[in-house]
Structures are given as C-alpha cells and as structure tokens.
Image: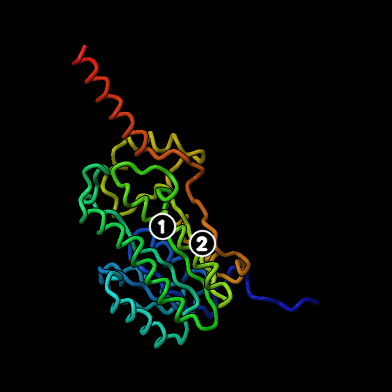
Amino acid sequence: MPTPKRPMFSLEDKAIVVTGGGRGIGRGITLAMAQAGAKGVVITGRKAEALEKTAEEARAFGAKVVTVPSDITKAEDIARIVDVTMSEFGYIDGWINNAGSADPVDVSDLMNMSESQWDHVVDLNLKWTFFCAQAAARAMTRGGSIVNISSRSGSQPCPMTGQYGAAKAGVESLTATAAVEWGHLGIRVNAIAPGVVPTERDDGSMLNQSRRRRQIETVPLRRLGKVEDIGPLAVYFVSDESSWITGTVVQATGGSRIPVGLLTYLWRKNKEAEERETAGA
C-alpha cells in the first residue's frame, strides 16, 4: 500500500511571510495560508491595528501568527522582518510580496506626470518588491518559494497610472529573471496578476454603479474579483505541489482582457476630440 501523505496543498510545518498582510488581498492571503495549515505566518504592514485584527482571524485556524508593523520602503525594516521570522520559526519557506499600491495623488497622464508621482509608485511597487525578494532569497538557505503580487496592469494599457503598470511589468520581468538565477538554489519565484478586486482601500471607483457595471461586462465570469480568489493561488505556489513551477505569472481576472479604465479614458478623449471638432466647424 502507498504510504499515506499529508493532504494536497498543505502548508504544514511551513513558515510564511506576507507583506501588506493585514488588509485587502494581503488579508485574504494571510487567512488562506493559515487555513492551509501553515506552521506560522508573519504579516507586515504600516497599520498595527489592521495587522492584529487579521492575525486574530488567522489564529482561529491554529496557525502561529506574528505581526511586524513595518515599512518595506526602509531596508532596516525588511531586515527586521527577516530577523523576526528566523527568530520565531528558524526558517522562511515562503515569502509573498503583496505590499504595493498607487495612491490617488499619484494619478496622472504621462505627459503631466511629476518625478515624485513616478518615484513614489515605481519605488514601492518595483524597487522594494525586489529588495524584499532579495532578502527572502538570501534567507532561504534550503530553498523556498517567493510569490510576487503583480497586476493585470502589468500587461495591459494603464492610462492615468502608467507608472503603476510599468512597475508591475517590471515585477513580472523580475519574476522571470529571479526564477532563472535562483532556481539552482531551490528557490522558486512566481507571480499572480489580479484583475479588479475591490478592497477597503478602493478609491471609490467601483462604488460607482455605472462604472462597476461596465467593468463586469468585460468579465466572462460576470463578477469582480474577491480577496478570497487570490489566497488559494498563493497557497498553491508555496505548497510542494507546485515544486516544478517557477517563473510563471498567473492572471486572475475572471477572463477579462479589457480594463474599464482604458475604455473610460478612450471615451473621454474621443468626446473631447468631438467637442473640439464641433467648436472648430
């Protein structure tokens, strides 16, 4: 008879780090890791209260959850995250680079984008994602799995937040290169590119029912994403069942290939062009 094995996709005995793990997609990933039986989950973020609230939810699944209030745009904080994880669990099996965003103040067309708008978004989403991945890889002396959270914006036009799309495209390129360079060390590097997943950080655009309807109309599966849709993918990439998968980007978009932001931008620009033509007639 075959030797009984642990359940598929179990994270038993694994220690996982989730940056930005207290809110939104990060919260969903944290809960999924705990539900999959992770030995320990270290969650980081700037909001200590949000981290602790999510930690309490995750602990209900039996996982040891440690919160590390921190800012990943500071090298010393990244080092502290590694130190705490090593001290608590002795090893890092998985690292989820989830922290990243584009704030409303960073919204701009490329022609008028300022240096600060560019740097803020690209640094957070690309530069510091790299240095987190590097720190994780250096600590994974017996192999492990790094999962970068990208975005559909990394492979499609991203009007008014072009620097965010460029940063996420960079994350996907970085994922492929790191997978090659670190593969001989037993370190796998993959990425997940979510589509529209409304969270508590949403800027309100999906509260606009007309915009929401137009976005849903672009999704073959007829709904927007939920944070619960992303966590299981992250579990798969950290689990032993994905041990021959690296350098891959999985799109989690409900099948949508048309960003509503692109449609809105083109509609507005076409209307402006028509108004200019009418005025000049």
- Secondary structure found at label 1: helix
Residue at the image position 62 percent from the left and 68 percent from the top: 241
User: On the rendered structure, is 158 left or right of 221?
Assistant: left
Q: Secondary structure at mark 2?
A: helix
Crowding near pointer 1: few (<14 within 10 Å), some, many (20+)? many
Q: In the figure, residue 81 lies in which quadrant? A: bottom left
Q: CA distance from mark 1 to mark 2?
A: 10 Å
- Could you tell me residue 15's position as x and y percent? 47, 78
Q: Which residue is mark 1?
A: 170
* Side of 233 relative to 195 (left or right): right
Q: Quadrant of the N terminus?
A: bottom right
* Image location (x, y in percent) of residue 268: 28, 30
Question: Who is closer to the viewer here, 186 or 19?
Answer: 186
- Visual colour scheme: rainbow
Q: Nearer the viewer, residue 147 or 233?
A: 147
* Residue where numbered disc 2 is placed: 176
